[in-house]
Image: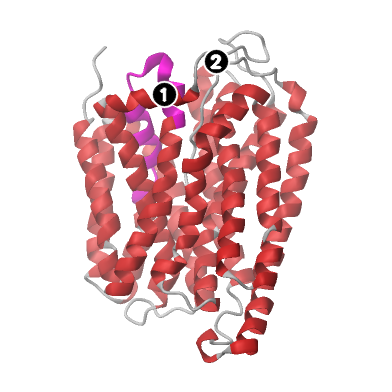
Amino acid sequence: MALNPGTKPAGTTAAGDADHGVNAPDLQVFVFALFFIFGGITSLNDVIIPKLKDLFTLNYGQALLVQSAFFAAYFVFSLPAAAIVRRMGYMQTAAIGLLLMTIGCVLFIPASSSGTFVVFLMALFVLAIGITTVQVVANPLISLLGAPRTASSRLTFAQFFNSLGTTIFPIVGSILILGSLAKVDSKTLTGAALDAHRTAETQVVVHTYLGLALALVLVAVVVWSRRKRLPHTVEQHGSIFQAFDLLKRPRFAFGTACIFLYVGAEVAIGSLIVSYLEQSSTMGFDAVTAGKHVAYYWGGAMVGRFIGAFVLRVVSPGKVLAGVAIGAVTLIAVSTHSTGAVAGWSLLAIGLMNSIMFPTIFSLASEGLGARAAEGSGIIATAIVGGAIVPPLTGVLADQSSLQFALLVPALCYLVIASYGVFTRKPTVG
């Protein structure tokens, strides 16, 4: 997904001039790799949810606590991560974030040994803290590595790698993690047999995340070895928490709320895709096939970014945002009032509508902030906690009614986002 918050500390660049970026193509490659990695790992949640739901015989509300544990890290650690950037600099902080991600992956070992769902949530929370730290670094860093006039181009290209990760990881994850899901029904096991089954099956998850841990260590070593390529970040004056007074501005506050709702809606739908497509009333897929189809949801976002980049040049961003948000609501309505392939593919097509929402909401909310745009970026990062709150609410509604009816929650989120598009259809004055 396109989660690219960050704060850009004040100070000089490696070139010694704030008006000139750092000409370092090799560092750009590493930052693109960061976008790919944290996008891909985040999308793996959509695959691990049905796995843990089956192993621990959870209802939807409980299973979607996976997203709560993961996205709560954005609320808890976005501003502290920004403070680390200001104190230690970009590259050092990126290396720290990668190591935290590695620790989170390794924690899947004791989680598997314990056979306890809560320990898995703790491992995911630590992993997400690392991802939060890396994301807070990645956006301003890719802007710094090159000429300012081409920063938007580099950011768009970086988001492509983010989407590439969210498209590829669910396919591979479905094969590795969900391959044995249908062989044994956990509901038929009890006592020692159930414990043994959980331990054996969670090892599949462990092996997947240990492979990621090894890759993360290698990337962290490379980043750390290049930490002196950029100067130490100059300390800003004042506390980063003073940025919260920006919420007094209606345009910014409304936009921050919409980031909360957008991430919540996007994650809620992504989390339920596997279960939704497994239903006989939709496409009746097995878990692996359904898991592979998650890639279409995130792949739609990747395609939509290229289309949106052109459309946003000729149409007001507010109008485009309102249009795609209404498009998402329409697709939800089509999906919930149809069956078979139409129901399944109309839900997956929402990924196309999601494509431009995060960067468009982000830019509209930041419009007019001037020198305080970086502070606003840090506040917006905390709003990604919507991914921790909206999905479980959707899951609870699914338990009480049906998956189709539960999609009312993200539909309401998109309606609010559409209203923000109308509200911001004209640029700020001055």
- Percent x, y of residue 329: 24, 55
**Mark sitting earlier along the chain (2/1):** 2
Tell me the residue at 30%/31% (across/down). 253
Q: Residue 139 — which label?
A: none
Q: What predominant SS class does the magenta segment belong to? A: helix
Residue under label 1, please give it. Answer: 243
The three-letter amino acid code for the residue at tag 2 is Gln
Query: Which residues, given as a range, are shown in magenta?
Result: 352-378
Residue 358 covered by magenta stretch: yes
Residue 387 covered by magenta stretch: no
Where on the picture, by quarter, is residue 113? bottom right
Q: Which structural element holds mark 1?
A: helix
The three-letter amino acid code for the residue at tag 1 is Ala
Tell me the residue at 51%/32% (across/down). 79
306 vs 58, nearest the viewer: 58
- Percent x, y of residue 160: 52, 42
- In the shown orientation, is residue 194 left or right of residue 330? right
Where on the picture, by quarter, is residue 115? bottom right
Q: Please, is residue 282 above or below residue 271 in the view?
A: below
- Percent x, y of residue 234: 62, 14
Q: Marks 2 and 1, how far apart in space?
A: 12 Å
Residue under label 2, please give it. Answer: 236
Residue 323 visible: yes
